[in-house]
Image: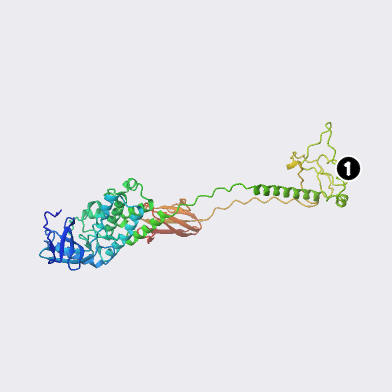
Amino acid sequence: MASSESLEIPQTLDRGRYRVERVLGEGGTSVVLLAQDTRLGVPRAIKLMHPRWVRSARNRARFRAEAFAQAGLGHNNVLMVHDAVEDEQGAYLVMELCEGDSLARRVQHHGTLSVNEVIDVGITIGGALAVAHAQGLVHRDLKPQNILVDKHGVLKLADFGIAHIEQPGEQLTRAEDVMGTWDYMPPEQRESSAQVDRRSDIYAFGATLYALLTARKVAALHNPEAWTAAYDGVPAPLAAVLQRATRLYPEDRYPDMAAMIAELHAARAAIQAPPPAPAPPPAPARPWGLIAAAAAAALALTVGTAALLLLRGGPPSDEATAPADAPAPAPAPAPTPEEPSPAPRADDAPDVTPAAEPKPAPQGDGVAEARPRPAPATPEPAAAPRPAPGGRRVIEVLPEEGGEAPAPAPALAPAEAAPTGTVRVRTVPSGATVTVRGRAPAAAPGGGYTLPVGQHTVELTSPAGERTRLAVSVRAGQTVSLCWSFDTNAACGDAP
């Protein structure tokens, strides 16, 4: 690594326009200086390349490519390049000065970022990366040290010094070169920096967000066996995004930054969703509830009494025309101890013939009716005594003479087996779980799943927890094929 001791720091640059004040930081290929622009009266950051790095024509070409690519992005969250100079003092970039600090130093001095802050960084810097990728620029050195904060709190993506230009015929990196920061490199970049594309930046960006959230080492995020410990305490929706971004093979990661940003928005919505409201407590008992219950009981008693009178043929005429001050009829004499009153029977009823003296209720199988009926030819077995509530007798209402009792309802015929069809499912990546209404459908002979005829919603859950729902129409004896790619969030062809 080059150091300020081995690199002579000039007092001025660009023929005295920039007055150097101090060293801001050092890297493997350059040193960053704080300088004052004497012409405009504003501070600048100057990235001075090490003389050994710019001796080769290939490195000078890289220097110019970085200057043009970074200056051409024109994004508010990309550190602005004002000028690129090559003179007798060396090669250097004149850049916007971020008076804040890097996110790496913030985590070091103030602790990790919150979940919402990490998602904000992902959406903001992810947008800047999407613009760079659209212009064919791959950063190749994403890490917390290269995300800066200016004095207004605006995030800035910096240091495109080893960026790769995706252009035909443009080869600025040898196949054996390995450039970047090891902990954040995707596995393919650790073998060679030449075989990278935008999905390599997606891996490094996922590792960067993970480091900002946990401050843990991130070298093996692509190993699913380490996920249980690595993502302990990370909300599941955000963990799913970072796990997909840092998968081992590039084709298993997000295809572009736009897809990853969309998932970050969805993760935020899932994390911030309010919990379900608790069930309300039962309402306390109120006095008017007891009053209503008593009124209902009184009404039932009145209705029952009226029904009994109707069955008995109505009240006697003399009682109906009696004056209000007439004395009440004498109560029935109580039975003597020597001759106890028989227990009431379910089919007993009092005589309906009015008389001056009340008659005792008939014994045996007598039933109160509006008109007499002939006794049955054979005696019916006596029903077991069943006293009615409140000591009243239960009156059985029989069908009229000559009528027939209603026939019992016919038993339901056993339902025939419902017709079914077969649904075959393929997913990319494979290994997804298939459920219908929260349950695994029955396996069909020869592969697929057996479902009843009709419309169904099939839910697919990938091994990484991604979900989608597909509507399918099942017909009798036919096979329907589904294919879904979780990489592109779209249906795929060549279904089985």
Relative to 323, is 494 on the left or the right? left
Q: Amino acid at mark 1?
A: Glu
Q: Is residue 156 above or below residue 235?
A: below
- The quarter holding residue 266 reads bottom left
**Residue lying farthest right?**
356
- The quarter holding residue 78 reads bottom left
Q: Nearer the viewer, residue 106 or 412?
A: 106
Q: Is residue 368 above or below residue 170?
A: above
Q: Nearer the viewer, residue 353 or 470?
A: 353
Instruction: Give coordinates of residue 230: x percent, y percent.
Output: 32, 47
Instruction: Give coordinates of residue 311: x percent, y percent.
Output: 80, 49
The residue tagged 1 is 357
Tell me if residue 479 can be seen: yes
- Classify 10 Å Cα crowding around label 1: few (below 14), some (14-19), many (20 and above): few
Q: Secondary structure at mark 1?
A: loop
Instruction: Give coordinates of residue 162: x percent, y percent.
Output: 20, 59
- The quarter holding residue 95 reads bottom left
Relative to 301, is 229 on the left or the right? left
Instruction: Give coordinates of residue 355: x percent, y percent.
Output: 89, 45
